[in-house]
């Protein structure tokens, strides 16, 4: 067997076994990418970054290359774009450096995880579950900057745990209780007691209650007040603001429709909705056109008209349109689909296989969902297979699993609930097939019933790189909740008379 | 800095703080707040319940923001207070500048700034401030989004140096896609559908082509170029340009996968060029951009359908 050095001079004799500590110090905000630009509201995990020991110089000779490693190295070479990208600028330097950090994880197994039959690290189910459970526990005082994002902490953990196959019923009572304290008297949910209602917090709250399910959880939601709150968020131009006096962006359009649809709320605007003064009568008025105005010259969708195309906002826009009607109808009606698909395809980084969120940005595990989740919707609209699932699965298993549990943006970063939830959701998108079935009407209602017409259609049958042990649960393509949970919630409220 | 408390401060003696209510059962993801944070929040909840808007609210909210800058409720209440008491808004901007630099990734601060600048009615000094933010993080989504709002609100599209500044940002890092997006916003996107005059179109095409030549594998400049051409319905006119980087008769010398991609699109629209389009897509799928093979094969499938072009 060849010795590593003879193969790759750049490995200099030895190979880094552990990742170097994150380049940023623990004091810096988390996920280098602005949390801002994502659906989340807060520097989640910022303070969770504990000092990693300084492993910068910690090299360990791990001997010769295994057959599996050689296969990974050959694979990476086969999907590398064979054109030099010159001259170097700030962006390409960052790209080159990030890849040097990621490469050892795609070629080998620096975390010493047990490998599956394809030579990739197995899904570390127990470790991730333990991490997500601990994220539901108490936080020390330095986590005060998360005070407004606690609904997210619950949602990310609950969604991640259920996808890993964990029973979360033990949390049901506490989840319901936690959100009853965050409910705002005039409707919607805030980050916690006494905080203004906010659509992101409301989305995370309603989804969490949907995930735990049961009469007590459902009945804890004040639907009439919620309807009024959503009426306050609807804007004359068709979009939604995130909070009273807050910003208007495409997250609002998605979160608002998720809540309307899950809770089976009336589509007509409440009488006190300010948008009524501008001639709007329903929540859907001008909405399709507003989402359409977020499509940029690149083909992707942005937070608001004029801004840069971005993965998380693209998912919000597509999912919003897919609640409004069948993707086959609403996507081509409001979006230039070929340009969108072009842009989405280019978000997959070569050779990493994971996704970035914007042109010329770095791969980040959270886009395993934000872009990965767009594909089921785009494929429902085109009826064609469009994306490279094995490459994403490879990135998640090989590069996004943290040694001690939890999933990450990229090697060298600390895990958090956000990246854990959305990497796991991405793995689910890779592994499971969903189809939109005109004939299927899961919940049997007329209004906003498109989300209920999805069917699961077995596993992805292409080049799988995962064993049975690495398979996670099915996730609803619109709501990002365990398969069946959203349907239960909707059925419950359909069976109720009025509010 | 020493912790600040209110219970022994005579200025706040009239307020009964509203402590955090956890309702008896231990909540999930509970934070063990410091006494300082707990107390400040208790006073904030109390004054919010009273709808008090006064100068001392600015001090209280500043304090809470220093402890938790991601607290949207505090920012929204502070903005309300500023307007209710007619506080001097320039002072607010002076205070915001160092606060923003301290919390680069903060979400709320930009919306707050926008609210204040909107009311001030002047963009003076904003460009400089944005520059200092971008020096730390040249692709910060909120900073660029704010800049777009600023351009639109104060009509900075022309004659105010905005285009020159953007050009400088692109030249500094020709892969900074945020800068390219801003340029698009200035030239086309922000102008509410106003037609692009021929001179501007030519200038932009020349600009994009020059930067493509500088870095032929840069996605940003190609996206801009293709966006422009599509906007002017003249994509097919880019054929010769694409051929400079991707000549199908020399498949071993492709200098840009993006050129190949564009060429495939153009060939798909031409009579009797479907085979060449297929050849370009095959080169992408098998050699020059194989990670997207599924996509390139999908594009090949579209060639069979009359009129369907990606």
Image (tube, coloured by chain):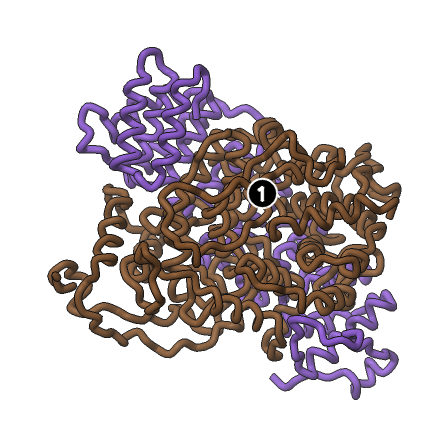
Chain colours: A brown, B purple
Q: Where is B10 relative to B310, above or below?
A: below
Q: Where is A358 relative to B11, above or below?
A: above
Residue nearest the viewer, comparing A478 with A95:
A478
Residue B223, x across and y down, in percent: 41, 35
Asked if residue A155 lies left or right of residue A311, the reply is right
Q: Quadrant of residue A253?
A: top right
Asked if residue A175 lies left or right of residue A427, the reply is right
Residue B48, x across and y down, in percent: 82, 67
Quadrant of the snapshot with the C terminus of chain B: top left
Q: Residue at x 71, y 46 (%)?
A: A256
Residue behind mark 1: B151
Count every numbered label the image shows and give the total: 1
Question: Quick one: which residue is furthest to the top in this view?
Answer: B271
Q: Where is B28 relative to A491, above or below?
A: below
Q: Residues within 10 Å of mark 1 (few under 14, many from 20)?
A: some
Q: Quadrant of residue A8?
A: bottom left
Residue A78, x across and y down, in percent: 25, 45
Give the SS element for disc 1: helix
Q: Residue at x 23, y 53 (%)?
A: A71
Residue nearest the viewer, comparing A9 with A499:
A499
Residue nearest the viewer, comparing B149 with B24:
B24
Q: Is residue B266 visible?
A: yes
Q: Chain of mark 1?
A: B
Residue nearest the viewer, comparing A147 with A368:
A368
Residue A17, x across and y down, in percent: 28, 70
Quadrant of the snapshot with the N terminus of chain B: bottom right
Q: Residue at x 29, y 33 (%)?
A: B284
Q: Quadrant of residue B204?
A: top left
Q: Where is A6 relative to A321, above or below?
A: below
């Amino acid at each position: 067997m060849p010795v590593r050095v003879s193969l790759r001079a750049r490995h200099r004799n030895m190979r880094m076994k552990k990742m170097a500590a994150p380049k940023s110090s623990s004091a810096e905000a988390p996920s280098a990418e602005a949390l801002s630009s994502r659906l989340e509201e807060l520097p989640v995990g910022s303070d969770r970054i504990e000092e990693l020991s300084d492993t910068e110089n910690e090299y360990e000779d791990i001997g010769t290359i295994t057959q599996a490693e050689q296969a990974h190295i050959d694979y990476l070479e086969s999907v590398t774009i064979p054109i030099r990208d010159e001259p170097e600028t700030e962006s390409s330097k960052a790209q080159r450096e990030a890849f040097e950090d990621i490469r050892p994880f795609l070629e080998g197994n620096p975390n010493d995880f047990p490998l599956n039959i394809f030579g990739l690290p197995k899904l570390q189910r127990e470790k991730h579950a333990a991490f997500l459970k601990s994220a539901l526990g108490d936080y020390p005082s330095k986590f005060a900057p998360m005070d407004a994002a606690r609904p997210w902490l619950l949602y990310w953990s609950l969604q991640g745990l259920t996808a890993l196959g964990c029973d979360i019923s033990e949390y049901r009572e506490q989840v319901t209780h936690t959100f009853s304290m965050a409910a705002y008297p005039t409707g919607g949910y805030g980050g916690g007691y006494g905080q203004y209602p906010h659509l992101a917090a409301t989305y995370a709250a309603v989804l969490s209650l949907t995930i735990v399910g049961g009469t007590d959880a459902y009945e804890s939601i004040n639907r009439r007040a919620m309807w009024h709150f959503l009426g306050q968020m609807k804007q004359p131009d068709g979009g939604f603001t995130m909070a009273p006096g807050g910003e208007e962006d495409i997250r609002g359009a998605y979160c608002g429709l998720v809540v309307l649809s899950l809770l089976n709320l009336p589509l007509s605007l409440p009488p006190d909705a300010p948008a009524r003064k501008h001639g709007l009568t329903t929540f859907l008025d001008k909405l399709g056109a507003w989402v359409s105005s977020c499509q940029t010259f690149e083909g992707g969708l942005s937070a608001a008209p004029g801004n840069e195309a971005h993965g998380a906002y693209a998912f919000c826009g597509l999912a919003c349109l897919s609640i409004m009607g069948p993707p086959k109808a609403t996507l081509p009606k409001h979006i230039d689909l070929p340009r969108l698909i072009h842009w989405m395809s280019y978000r997959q980084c070569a050779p990493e296989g994971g996704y970035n969120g914007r042109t010329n940005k770095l791969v980040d595990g959270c886009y395993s969902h934000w872009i990965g989740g767009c594909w089921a919707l785009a494929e429902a609209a085109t009826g064609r297979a469009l994306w490279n699932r094995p490459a994403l699965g490879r990135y998640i298993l090989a590069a996004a699993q943290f040694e001690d549990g939890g999933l990450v943006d990229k090697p060298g970063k600390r895990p958090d609930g956000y990246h854990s939830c959305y990497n796991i959701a991405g793995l689910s998108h890779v592994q499971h097939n969903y189809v939109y079935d005109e004939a299927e009407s899961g919940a049997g209602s007329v209004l906003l019933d498109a989300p209920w017409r999805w069917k699961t259609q077995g596993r992805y049958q292409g080049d799988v790189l995962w064993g049975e042990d690495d398979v996670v649960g099915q996730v609803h393509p619109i709501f990002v909740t365990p398969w069946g949970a959203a349907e239960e919630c909707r059925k419950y409220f359909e069976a109720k008379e009025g509010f | 800095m020493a912790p600040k408390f209110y219970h022994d401060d005579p200025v706040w003696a009239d307020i009964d703080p509203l402590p955090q209510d956890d309702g008896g059962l231990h909540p999930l993801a509970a934070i063990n707040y410091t006494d300082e944070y707990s107390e400040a929040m208790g006073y904030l909840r109390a004054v919010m319940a009273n709808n008090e808007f006064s100068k001392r609210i600015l001090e209280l909210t500043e304090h809470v923001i220093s402890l938790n800058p991601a607290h949207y409720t505090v920012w929204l209440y502070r903005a309300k207070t500023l307007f209710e008491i007619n506080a001097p808004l320039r002072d607010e901007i002076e205070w915001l500048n160092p606060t923003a630099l301290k919390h680069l990734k903060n979400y709320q601060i930009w919306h707050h700034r926008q609210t204040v600048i909107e009311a001030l009615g002047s963009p003076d000094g904003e460009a400089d401030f944005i520059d200092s933010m971008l020096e730390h993080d040249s692709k910060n989504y909120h900073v660029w989004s704010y800049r777009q709002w600023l351009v639109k609100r104060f009509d900075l599209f022309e004659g105010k140096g905005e285009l020159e500044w953007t050009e400088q940002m692109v030249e500094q890092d020709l892969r900074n896609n945020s800068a390219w997006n801003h340029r698009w916003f200035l030239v086309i996107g922000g102008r509410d559908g106003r037609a692009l005059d021929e001179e501007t179109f030519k200038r932009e095409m020349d600009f994009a082509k020059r930067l493509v030549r500088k870095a032929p594998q840069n996605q940003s400049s190609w996206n801009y170029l293709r966006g422009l051409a599509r906007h002017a319905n003249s994509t097919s006119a880019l054929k010769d340009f694409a051929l400079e980087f991707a000549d199908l008769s020399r498949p071993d010398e492709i200098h840009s996968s993006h050129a190949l991609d564009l060429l495939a699109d153009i060939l798909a629209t031409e009579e009797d060029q479907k085979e060449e389009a297929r050849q370009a897509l095959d080169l992408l799928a098998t050699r020059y951009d194989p990670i997207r093979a599924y996509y390139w094969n999908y594009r090949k499938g579209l060639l069979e359908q009359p009129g369907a072009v990606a």
